[in-house]
Image (tube, coloured by chain):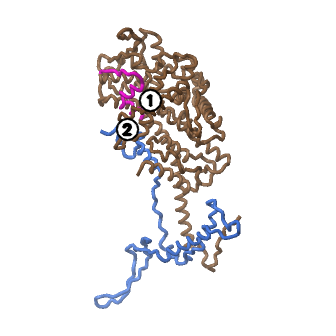
């Protein structure tokens, strides 16, 4: 027999005689469902060739500029010297960009399908030809 | 996950949500006593969490929920709303009906569990009756008091709904007086023979209309027919529970009606049991309601006796600010005649009660070093501690109602019906020990009633924060997508490759 106050409740219900049940109920309130981000049109992705690439200096500049948003002082210290915290931001950005550009790998899988045009000679078997995929293919990638 | 870890996690969730939602947090959340506490009584923690999570609507903060930081008048107003003492005021007044309803359900469950009541049975014929000595239904001698004169009237509710008033009038009518309570119970005041003398007793018979009906129907009809607490007198009774305010007032005018030390000790022992029960988790493997809940070592007994002595004087010693301070009897004059005021203006009942309640809370706040006005800039910690004490007193008050005639009569009739015996006991503590299952059930239900109200209020506040985060997340996703597309369709200049780096604004 269940102990007094420790009776089982229906799934999802809170037993207000059980402290842990109340805490679980409260923790569950913070759960926000994940939504799947919509993909960018494949043709548009091809335009990414024109992107400038990552710049540690630009990232650091933007972070330092936004320090004020967090209530931190921006600019040189009282004695006119450069703030070590801001130098640290540059180092941080450099290291992150360095890691992304030199250490990260991307595993790519292309979704099968698409239209391909085959050209070649219709001579005796075996036929040898070359195929050109004329549609833009989609896929998925995982960074590592 | 551990119990304390869970509590810590909750506080961090709120803090994180505030930061993610672009909301600087309103107050320091580190080192909160209730988070570190090993007690399983969540009432203080819920109140703390409430004051952390509570935000006022629409005062135009930076994010989607206004901040509590800073010092603008709007922000100050928001902070006031979130003070725990105000939360208590709302619970006492706005959530009173809900609190009573859950407590009534708890008493029914407690009686059935305590008496090992079979699932369902019918009231037999002839209608069962029970004959009770005064101490078997009214250990605190409530029926000897005047239900109409101030201050004893504060113990009673409306004549139509409070069975205690009905029984008091009946008993004071003398032997031979009879009465029928809403066609549910028949009463007769009798001469109860004792070995050498006799006393005034009460014969209680289940109304014949219930013969052949389910016991459950009788229980529900009975509990729905009575008023557990009177709305207008609830706060004075809370004060009585806190420091014996009404008893002290009664003792001033009528020494014979003052609380004896023996009764006062019994009351403090019962309250100590309530605290011990609420401090435990019934689902802990090692939990067992053993004798340790009802036995006290010499230090505890000294403490209990000291509290009992103070209660007789209407005093409660508190230590909120390193200096022991006495909460003295509160002037309950504003509650004199409040029932009549409410009867004349029923639509203003909440307002009238809120005002009187606020006066009392202001007075105590002033006594213990806060400010006289709740709206004033007082000592936050003192007010916080006071509101914790008031909240922790609530389950004691709703538990102690089981010792009053209106519930004791129901218990004794039920016991006679199910076990063919009645409970003979020395005092309330003795009764609680003898009926530990019933008592534990009522205590846990009383605590659960308050926790449910706090949870629902807290849920409302947390959902506001979570909604804010959800909005921020959606905004972030849209913003990201727009930036990505803009960067792909010419939102950045690659022409000359000379894009100025934005310089920090130095002021």
**What is the x, y in percent for residue B159?**
50, 19
Region of the chain picked out in magenta, as a range: B420-443
Q: Residue furthest bottom?
A: A123
Residue plotted at (30% across, 16% down): B126
Q: Is residue B399 left or right of residue B154?
A: left
Label the blue chain with its letter.
A
The picture's colour for chain B is: brown
Above or below, comparing residue B224 to residue A19 in the picture? above
Element type at marker 2? loop
Q: Is residue B498 left or right of residue B242?
A: right
Residue plotted at (52% across, 19% down): B258
**What is the x, y in percent for residue B10?**
48, 50
Same chain assignment for discs 2 and 1: no
Q: Does the image show residue B414?
A: yes
Above or below, comparing residue B338 to residue B285 in the picture? above
How many labels, in total?
2
**What is the x, y in percent for residue B297?**
42, 33
Q: Residue furthest front?
A: B298
What residue is pinned by disc 2? A5
Above or below, comparing residue B26 to residue B351 in the picture? below
What residue is pinned by disc 1? B269
Q: Nearer the viewer, mark 2 or mark 1?
A: 1
How far is the residue under mark 2 from the one under mark 1? 22 Å
Packing grade of label 2 (10 A; few <14, some 14-19, many >=20) is some
Question: Image quadrant for the C terminus of chain B?
Answer: bottom right
Q: Is residue B44 left or right of residue B335?
A: left
């Amino acid at each position: 027999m269940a102990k007094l106050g420790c009776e089982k409740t229906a799934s999802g219900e809170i037993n207000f005689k059980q402290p842990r049940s109340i805490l679980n109920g409260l923790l569950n309130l913070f759960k926000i469902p994940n939504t799947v981000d919509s993909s960018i049109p494949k043709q548009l992705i091809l335009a990414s060739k024109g992107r400038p690439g990552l710049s540690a200096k630009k990232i650091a500049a933007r972070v330092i500029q936004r320090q004020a948003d967090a209530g931190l002082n921006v600019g040189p210290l009282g004695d006119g010297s450069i703030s070590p915290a801001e130098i640290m931001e540059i180092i941080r950005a450099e290291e992150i960009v360095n890691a992304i550009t030199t250490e990260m790998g991307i595993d790519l899988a292309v979704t099968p399908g698409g239209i391909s045009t085959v050209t070649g000679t219709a001579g005796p078997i075996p036929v040898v030809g070359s195929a050109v995929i004329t549609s833009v293919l989609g896929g998925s990638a995982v960074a590592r | 996950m551990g119990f304390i870890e869970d509590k810590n996690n909750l506080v961090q969730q709120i803090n994180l949500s505030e930061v993610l939602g672009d909301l600087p947090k309103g107050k320091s959340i580190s080192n909160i006593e209730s988070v570190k506490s090993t007690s399983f009584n969540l009432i203080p923690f819920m109140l703390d969490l409430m004051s952390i999570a509570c935000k006022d609507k629409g005062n135009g903060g930076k994010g989607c929920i206004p901040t509590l930081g800073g010092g603008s008048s709007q922000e100050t107003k928001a902070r006031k709303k979130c003070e725990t003492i105000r939360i208590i005021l709302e619970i006492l007044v706005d959530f009173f009906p809900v609190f009573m309803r859950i407590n009534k359900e708890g008493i029914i469950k407690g009686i059935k569990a305590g008496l090992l009541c079979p699932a369902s049975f019918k009231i037999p014929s002839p209608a069962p009756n029970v004959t009770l000595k005064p101490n078997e239904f009214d250990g605190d001698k409530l029926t000897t008091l005047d239900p109409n004169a101030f201050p004893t009237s504060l113990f009673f509710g409306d004549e139509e709904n409070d069975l205690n008033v009905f029984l008091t009038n009946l008993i004071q009518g003398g032997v031979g007086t009879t009465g029928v309570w809403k066609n549910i119970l028949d009463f007769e005041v009798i001469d109860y023979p004792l070995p050498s003398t006799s006393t005034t007793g009460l014969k209680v018979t289940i109304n014949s209309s219930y013969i052949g009906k389910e016991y459950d129907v009788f229980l529900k009809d009975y509990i729905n027919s009575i008023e557990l607490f009177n709305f207008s007198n609830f706060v004075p009774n809370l004060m009585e529970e806190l420091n014996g305010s009404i008893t002290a007032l009664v003792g001033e005018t009528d020494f014979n009606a003052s609380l004896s030390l023996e009764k006062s000790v019994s009351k403090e022992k019962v309250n100590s049991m309530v605290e011990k029960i609420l401090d435990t988790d019934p689902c802990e493997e090692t939990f067992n309601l053993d004798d340790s809940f009802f036995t006290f070592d010499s230090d505890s007994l000294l403490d209990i006796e000291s509290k009992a002595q103070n209660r007789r004087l209407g005093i409660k010693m508190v230590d909120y600010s390193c200096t022991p301070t006495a909460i003295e009897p509160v002037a309950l004059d504003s509650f004199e005649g409040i029932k009549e005021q409410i009867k004349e203006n029923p639509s203003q009942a909440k307002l009238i009660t809120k005002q009187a309640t606020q006066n009392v809370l202001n007075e105590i706040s002033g006594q213990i070093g806060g400010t006289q006005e709740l709206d004033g800039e007082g000592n936050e910690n003192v007010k916080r501690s006071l509101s914790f004490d008031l909240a922790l007193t609530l389950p004691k008050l709703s538990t102690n109602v089981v010792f009053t005639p209106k519930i004791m009569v129901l218990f004794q009739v039920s016991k006679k019906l199910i076990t063919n015996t009645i409970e003979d006991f020395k005092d309330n503590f003795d009764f609680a020990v003898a009926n530990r299952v019933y008592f534990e059930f009522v205590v846990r239900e009383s605590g659960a009633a308050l926790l449910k109200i706090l949870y629902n209020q807290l849920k409302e506040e947390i959902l506001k924060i979570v909604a804010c985060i959800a909005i921020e997340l959606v905004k972030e996703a849209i913003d990201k997508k727009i930036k990505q597309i803009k960067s792909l369709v010419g939102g950045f200049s690659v022409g000359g490759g000379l894009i100025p780096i934005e310089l920090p604004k130095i002021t």
